[in-house]
């Protein structure tokens, strides 16, 4: 194809980090992004230009544009970590192919994205567009963190924010691998849906007896890993209610309070520990072979119907500034941005 | 020797655990212990009876008698984890020898103690009695935790409660192994003494600019491990001020407040983690060879003068109920109990 000179994109207004910790909620994009016409980025050595078909919106994207993520913002550069599209330029055998990508150089909320050729993920033809646009952040995180669960050799694991897309994928992995998912949610109406997906137990964190219910469940099922996307006091309370050798793996900060370590002695006497999980680091640690194997599994799970992306809304790029906050406020599904419209 | 029927001992008044978290301070022993005449314990299979020469008093002993330690109390059984004495009964080639011991079956604050033969540590003849009576808990913890420091491959490490006996041993290890100790203390008057021992930097935690000073020091010296005996908010603040990949190793709870995880995102993006250290678990993990090698090093360090136990007081067993709290309140040294007097 002929690559145009300019493109439409959601462009970042700030550099670097903010000192705020406001979480992944957002009411208004205008303090952080601008819908603009900018130059299509030039392809450097080892890079690929992708004509974006569809881009995902993840909590990490919102953390990032707010300056609250682990990478610095770049003023004038499009936002958006993840999407699917066609490779239209770059020194790669995937030129002309449909690929999923993590945008390292110029973001996915744009007509064209720029990234390293090493991170391109070819897509099976039978992989749906929404699955292809969102197969990196959530599915790969689910596979990676489920490795931690498997390494624990426990018969169960605990996850909060279990009604999230990532939560649902983790429940599916637990069910299919015979490791009982103990799911923590905030709303009663999520309970039946998660049981249908394979949760062995669903605990509503806002119920008055939630912690007692968790303790009883933990005694019966002996979980060893807590996968925590919330980072609040209830996550800490769950951790301290878990049996010996438990690991609290924090991978997100939906809450804005700072949890207290009320039972620090458990780290000494019960061999408990607290860690973080970051997909970017995991990919470096395990290396490309493990990551490739994970994408084979991910694409199989999607095409076999073991995983299904929940689509809340697909917002045209031109409407995203106005419509994205309301679309994200709708719960329990993913929002996508379509730059073709 | 002829073993008598009865002995004097400081006997525990309670079973199991308490629900309190009051730390290792103590004003009065009478709620927890009684000075009493009881039967000398019978030696079972795999056990050794030791005529105690001198017993140590460690913070973990006080935690234990209060029911705040990781092992349950046993009503009617003498307290005291650690001491030195002569093996007077038991199926062991160390019969008749002077040994250091960790009392697993009947405590060291007594004329006779009972323990597993596998845990007996023979003492070099030139090892002083106070060193022999206290070579397990503090020296072995220092060696074990310094292994974590060495594994980190950093050029420095951070320790708080640095004026404690264990803190001084850790500073000595850092100095002799070329790993700069960054020492945190609460009182200005400890600064010079710790610098003389080999601390590269001493920070007084009660000074108004303490955290800023720590940040500057950490930027220059890049420590990777925080050895924390306090478990307070300042320990958490130090941890969050440390560079990427830092590990917070908590091994004691001198403070009674619950620290807040104010920068949980650092666990995700900076690969930081929080763990506990317990000597009992370490000994099982590393096995008897490593432990034996550690005691060779410990006894060499004592006899060569690289380590010196600071003796605050040696209290006769018969006076301990009355005199121990005041002796422990005196700072910066160890207190011992002598059952021969």
Image (cartoon, coloured by chain):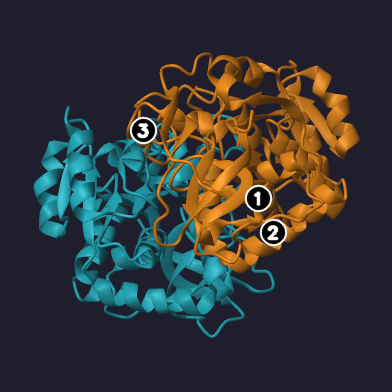
Chain colours: A cyan, B orange
Crowdedness near tag 1: few (<14), some (14–19) or many (≥20) residues, C-alpha within 10 Å:
many
Mark 3 and mark 2 residues within 8 Å of each other at the beta carbon: no
Q: Earlier in the sequence, mark 1 or mark 2?
A: 1
Residue B93: percent from left, percent from top: 59, 66
Residue ranking furthest to the front = B2
Pointers 1 and 2 in contact (CB under 8 A)? yes
Q: CA distance from mark 3 to mark 2?
A: 33 Å
Q: Is residue B242 left or right of residue A176?
A: right
Give the residue drawn at x 33%, y 80%: A124
> Can you give x and y, in whole percent of width and height, for residue A216 in the image?
18, 43
Of circles 3 and 2, which is in front?
A: 3
Q: In the depicted view, which residue is nearer to us: A58 or B109?
A: B109
The correct choice, above or below, for A275 with respect to A129 in the image is above
Q: Is residue B294 left or right of residue A282?
A: right
Q: Secondary structure at mark 2?
A: helix
Q: Does residue B317 appear left or right of residue B301 in this picture?
A: left
Q: Quadrant of residue A325?
A: top left
Q: Which comes before the other along the chain, label 3 or label 1?
A: 3
Return the disc, 3 or 2, that comes first in the chain's sequence: 3
Tell me the subunit letter for badge 2. B
The residue identified by callout 1 is: B140
* Relative image position of residue B115 (x, y in whole percent): 49, 51
Q: Which residue is mark 2?
A: B294
| Residue pictured at 63% horizontal, 25% vertical | B316
Look at the numbered disc 1 and give the secondary structure of its residue: helix
- Which chain does tag 3 point to? B
Q: Which mark is residue B76?
A: 3
Q: Chain of mark 1?
A: B
> In front: mark 3 or mark 1?
3
């Amino acid at each position: 194809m002929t690559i145009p000179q300019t493109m439409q994109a959601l462009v970042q207004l700030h550099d670097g980090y903010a000192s705020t910790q406001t979480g992944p909620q957002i009411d208004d994009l205008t303090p952080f992004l601008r819908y603009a016409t900018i130059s299509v980025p030039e392809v450097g050595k080892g890079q690929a230009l992708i004509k974006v078909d569809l881009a995902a919106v993840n909590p990490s994207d919102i953390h990032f544009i707010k300056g609250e993520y682990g990478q610095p913002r770049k003023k004038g550069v499009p936002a958006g970590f993840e999407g699917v599209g066609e490779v239209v330029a770059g020194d790669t055998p995937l030129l002309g192919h449909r690929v999923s990508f993590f945008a390292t150089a110029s973001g996915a909320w744009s007509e064209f994205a720029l990234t390293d050729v090493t991170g391109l993920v070819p897509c099976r033809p039978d992989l749906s567009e929404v699955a292809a646009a969102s197969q990196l952040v959530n599915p790969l995180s689910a596979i990676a963190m489920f490795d931690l669960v498997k390494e624990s050799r426990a018969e169960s694991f605990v996850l909060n924010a279990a009604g999230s897309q990532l939560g649902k994928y983790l429940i599916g992995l637990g069910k299919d691998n015979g490791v009982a998912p103990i799911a923590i949610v905030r709303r009663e109406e999520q309970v039946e849906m998660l049981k249908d997906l394979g949760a062995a137990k669903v605990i509503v964190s806002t119920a008055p007896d939630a912690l007692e219910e968790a303790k009883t469940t933990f005694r019966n099922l002996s979980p060893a890993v807590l996968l925590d996307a919330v980072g609040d006091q209830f996550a800490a309370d769950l951790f301290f209610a878990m049996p010996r050798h438990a690991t609290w793996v924090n991978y997100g900060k939906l809450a804005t309070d700072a949890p207290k370590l009320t039972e620090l002695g458990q780290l000494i006497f019960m061999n408990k520990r607290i860690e973080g999980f970051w997909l970017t680091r995991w990919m470096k640690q395990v290396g490309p072979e493990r990551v490739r194997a994970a994408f084979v599994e991910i694409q199989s799970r999607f095409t076999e119907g073991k995983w299904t992306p929940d689509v809340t809304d697909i917002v045209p790029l031109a409407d995203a500034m106005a419509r994205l906050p309301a679309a994200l406020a709708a719960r329990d599904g993913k929002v996508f941005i379509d730059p073709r419209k």
